[in-house]
Amino acid sequence: MAEAVVVSTKPRFFYGWVIVGVSMMINMMSGSLATVFGLFIIPMQSELGWSRTTIVFTTTIAALLGAVTHPLVGPIVDRYGGRVLMVATAVVGGTFIALSSQAHVPWQFYLLYGVLGTAVIQSAGAQVTSVVVAKWFVAKRGRALGFAFSGLSLGSFVMIPTLTLIINELGWRSGFVVMGVLLAVGIALPAGLFLRRNPEDMGLLPDGVQPAAAATAPPREEQSWTLGQALRTRTLWLLLAAWLFASFPLFAYFIHVIPYLRGEKEFGNLANVAWTTWFAFAFASKLVWGYLSEHIPPRFSVAACFLGEAAGLVVLLNVGHSVPMLFLWSVVGGIGHGPFAQLQTLIWADYYGRPFLGTIRGVLSPPTILGPALAPLLAAYVFQQQHSYRTVWLLFVVLFLVGTLLVLLATPPKAGGRKVPAPAPP
């Protein structure tokens, strides 16, 4: 009698979740660059005598350079993946951020921190991880992006208290050294060891769908829009305008909120605690929205996020000198901001598909970078003129509300892209 052969139907572990974990680690490092910079402003002012505008100008330089490099990075990620790019930019950028601790005049700081440090790392940070994760997942894209982008908040949650302690005990120069080393090692190692371009390169299917299952129930069909096709849709321009208005406030918010709370509102180190708490709630919000966004149309998810950002700023405007209000801002602001970055990737991927996502995002990124490039400088200038950030926060509330209206008008593009059937089972 022939012996029965038992075939295991248990699905194998999907490597896409390794990609998510690696992306989370990379985002932890690269995402904290903007959120911790505000910790350095007041100490640098005290030692060097530079104005707030002079210090913040380095972030404008870095962002403007990003507007040049991002369109080049997108097609590279689509074609070759982001592994080598990530390793190279992390090592170079982290080294020069550490060396910026030796700056004594503004041009040295701009060159070391802005041009060779921050601009290099940000050219291949969340832009790369967001595209890679979106290529590995379709049906589970929302939760995958939620986990990956939770690293942005988790990194700030860890880096803010760490660098606060180092700056308070050893000075701002030591803070830059530590930050540069952490960025170089924390990005280069996981990217070099584990990052891969897409599931098809490893003989896999998106979402970990098994070949047998794919043969009878193929994964969800997507449309694949080329850049040229996407540019001819009304939806693309509405989305671009929405993200332009909504992204304008963010860098300025991240950079100036600590000087605002420590200086204008006189909360001292409690401001750093509240800022860390803000990211704890942002972290939780990302995970929750990762699941919700798989069941709610993307434009409604994005609109809810923009309204949450506006609500956080309204609370910030009314903080006064109240500690309970300070931590209410941490809760409302963190929850509102949480899904911002992941929803941006989600809506572009859901509307225009996977194959040319890096190219589309890269080519369209300059307008959404120019706003953040100028906003921190504008906020610093307004503060110098008015000795208050109130006008800045009010302007940002209005911009988020405009972004909300525009994204609600951005309905999914009509059929026009090439239908992409489920990949053939490996």
Image (spheres, helix red, strand yellow):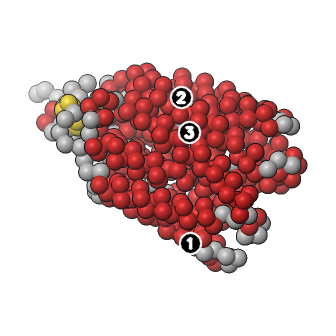
Q: x, y (%) of residue 296?
A: 29, 58
Which element carries disc 1, helix, strand or loop?
helix
Residue pictured at 27% horizontal, 43% vertical: 234
From this view, report whether residue 376 is shown above or below residue 358.
below
Give the Cα separation between the discs numbered 1 and 2.
36 Å
Residue at mark 3 to residue at mark 2: CA–CA distance: 19 Å
Extreme residue toward the left, this view = 1
Circle 3 crowding by C-alpha within 10 Å: few under 14, some 14–19, many from 20: many
For label 2, the residue is 69
Where residue 364 sits, quadrant-wise, is top left
Label 1 with label 3: CB-CB less than 8 Å = no
Q: Does residue 343 lie above or below 258 as drawn?
A: above
Q: Which mark is residue 176?
A: none
Q: Label 3, on which residue?
A: 26
Mark 1 or 2, nearer chain start: 2
Q: Callout 3: helix, strand or loop?
A: helix
Q: Nearer the viewer, residue 314 or 220?
A: 314
**Residue occupying image coordinates x 23% and y 29%:** 423
The answer to whether residue 107 shows anywhere in this view is yes
Indicate the position of residue 165 as horizontal and vertical percent values: 79, 54
Which residue carries the number 1 mark?
A: 315
The amino acid sitting under disc 2 is Thr
Residue at the (66%, 27%) spot, across then down: 91
Residue placed furthest toward the front: 385
Q: Quadrant of the C terminus?
A: top left
